[in-house]
Amino acid sequence: MNTVFWTFLAVFHAVVFTYFVVLNTYYLVMSIFAFRALRRYTRRLTSIDVDDLVASAGAPPVTLIVPAYNEAETIVASTRSLLTLRYPDYEILIVNDGSKDDTLEALREAYDLIPAPRFPLAHLATAPVRGAYHSRTHPNLWVLDKENGKRADAINAGINHCRTPLLCIVDADGLLEPDALIRVARPFLEDARTVASGGIIRIVNGCRVEDGLVREARLPRNPIARFQVLEYLRSFLAGRVGWDALKIMFLVSGAFGLFRRSLVVEVGGLAPDSLGEDLELTVRLHRHCRERGIPYEIHFVPDPVAWTEAPETLKVLGRQRDRWQRGLIDTMIRHVRMLFNPRYGRIGLVAYPYFFFLEMIGPIIEFTGYLVFLTVLALGVASLPFALLFLFVAVMLGSVLSIAAVGLEELTFRRYTRTRDLLRLFRLAFAENLGYRQILTYYRLRGTISYFRGLDGWGDMERKGFEEP
């Protein structure tokens, strides 16, 4: 029995070490590619004149689709930011998804809405639309009021009523910078094969906001939101920039993503029964184009910014990550035929396996690894080399990669101009791996259990609103 136990323990240690080494090696490779890509991109920015892009006659019309459910605290400010966008021709279509608060009333009062006819051009199945409203003060602002059908259903209703060749999905609790739309649309102007592009998401908590615009980027005072700033920097500047460089862009964020409307309608819109509808749509676009031999590109552009409100309590953060994990598993299972399938090129051979093994199955391995590590320490049977090696691959390498993400931010866009904020980010890079990461692993494991138990609720996402001076 003793021999069996030690054999099992040795095998399990090997699996956990392999997981951490592969995961951190992947992040390191992505960081290297991201560093090279960001250097090229920032040099290129010096030759890009946003005013010339705005004045370009070739910029296609865009409809911003904003699904809103119980967003009374933020909807007026976020709409105000959308109305300041520098883009030649765009409409804003807010879809009130049966809100139980004063979302519709806040919009009606702030923007003088009146009932107006707006007819659908597509017929994706959605919950009934109760009416359409048009702003008398802003001719490009429309509001659809519909019965509740959840986020994907609301976006599909917006797609049905979209009258432009491009549609941009934006969260109702987000703020876009004035030049964000023209920058995220640039891949469509440069390459006719582009079917989707996404921009970077940053945390608005703690920032100074005036008239729907972020005037000064600051770290949040709340420690949970601070960790998310670092997490988002690593995810976007190291992760997605690297994906784009390798042409394996696997996820266009539903908080700020631009899509070719005709193709989205062709694939059936967003999946209303998916909790990870943005990931699922991106994967479905890859699959659709690959299976039909359609030339296409999906891009990430690192400088158009959407600012979003992050959870500030563990309870709300847990709900969010639980839902994200369930959405990931759902997408992986729906499209499992892509796994290691050469028919889907780099997406099937590189991107899909990463998400399947490291993101979907990873939390089970990682959380169990932490438990076993603590158990062998408590029993006094862990050797010093084993303990040091585990801490190195699980903690130190993660800290180094987080520091690299902060370095990428400092070398490129430098949104956080205060020295104390930069120093805090470097400190967070170490602290993150000594508690916060383990908490997220637990929530992701809980999401895995929730999925296989058949739970499909969203949970309430509490909003505090933007900080006005």
Image (cartoon, helix red, strand yellow):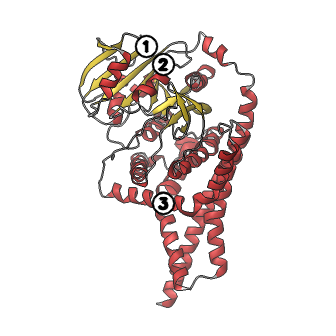
Q: In the displayed structure, would residue 311 be above or below residue 113?
A: below
Q: In the displayed structure, would residue 300 be above or below residue 131?
A: below
Residue to which mark 2 is pinned? 83
In this view, the residue in front, 464 or 123, is 464
In this view, the residue in front, 308 or 4, is 308
Q: Position of residue 159 (x, y in %)?
A: 38, 24
Q: Amino acid at mark 2?
A: Leu
Q: Are marks 2 and 1 in contact (CB under 8 Å)?
A: yes
Q: Residue at x 55, y 43 (%)?
A: 347
Distance, label 1 to label 3, CA atoms, is 44 Å
Q: Position of residue 429 (x, y in %)?
A: 63, 55
Give whichever of discs 2 and 3 has the lower sequence position: 2
Distance, label 2 to label 3, CA atoms, is 38 Å
Q: Amino acid at mark 3?
A: Ile
Question: Which marked residue is nearer to the observer: mark 2 or mark 1?
Answer: 2
- Does residue 4 show up? yes
Residue to which mark 3 is pinned? 439
Q: Residue at x 29, y 11 (%)?
A: 116
Q: Is residue 417 left or right of residue 448?
A: right
Q: Position of residue 305 (x, y in %)?
A: 57, 32
In this view, the residue in front, 241 or 6, is 241
Which mark is on residue 140? 1
Give whichever of discs 2 and 1 has the lower sequence position: 2
Q: Amino acid at mark 1?
A: Asn
